Amino acid sequence: MSFRISGESLDPAALQRALADRRAGACVSFEGWVRDRNDGQPVASLEYEAYAPLAEKEGARILAEAREKFAVLGTACVHRVGHLQLGELAVWVGVTAEHRGAAFDACRYIIDEAKARVPIWKKEHYAGGASAWINCATRGDHAPDTAGPIG
């Protein structure tokens, strides 16, 4: 599979089925959800933006690195964009491998590298009505004084 940016809700079961492989003895997945607090502030919702062609190109590089580094069979990552409500699935990563250790290691590698390298910007909407772009030094005039892509 691939790295995708999606404006639609994610279906983890369908994403996992797409990775099915009779050679695999393990499938490890990670789900990142919109939570109600961050850094002690009550969060009401999140908003994600990305330039999909660039984000997907870098994401594909990360998946290829994971397949090579961990000798896994299948990799996939989908990240949402748009306005997400509490509890919604924001990012899904899936990895299949012959053995669980490789699948766990590759899954962690993919989410960690995606957070560090893929240009996806996150805006937190707070319970009091304020909002702020966080962890996005490259966001232009909207960015606060913090660094890093996906938060």
Image: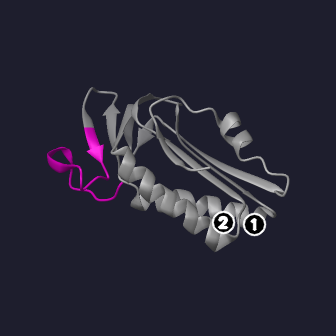
| Along the viewing direction, whichever of 122 and 53 lies nearer the viewer | 53
Type of residue at label 2?
Asp
Is residue 12 depicted above or below 1 in this figure? Answer: above
Residue 105: give its label.
2
| Along the viewing direction, whichever of 24 and 138 lies nearer the viewer | 24
Residue lying at 65% horizontally and 37% vertically, measured from the top left = 12
Magenta-tinted stretch: 132-151
Residue 43 visible in this rendered orientation of the protein = no
Q: Quadrant of residue 50?
A: top left
Question: What type of secondary structure mainly makes up the magenta span?
Answer: loop
Image coordinates of residue 33 in percent, x first then y, are 53, 39
| Along the viewing direction, whichever of 145 and 90 lies nearer the viewer | 90
Residue lying at 72% horizontally and 67% vertically, measured from the top left = 102
Residue 53 visible in this rendered orientation of the protein = yes
Image coordinates of residue 91 in percent, x first then y, are 52, 43
Is 150 in the magenta? yes
Q: Which residue is mark 1?
A: 101
> How far separated are the C-alphas under marks 1 and 2?
6 Å
User: Is 67 left, or right, of 136 in this rendering?
Assistant: right
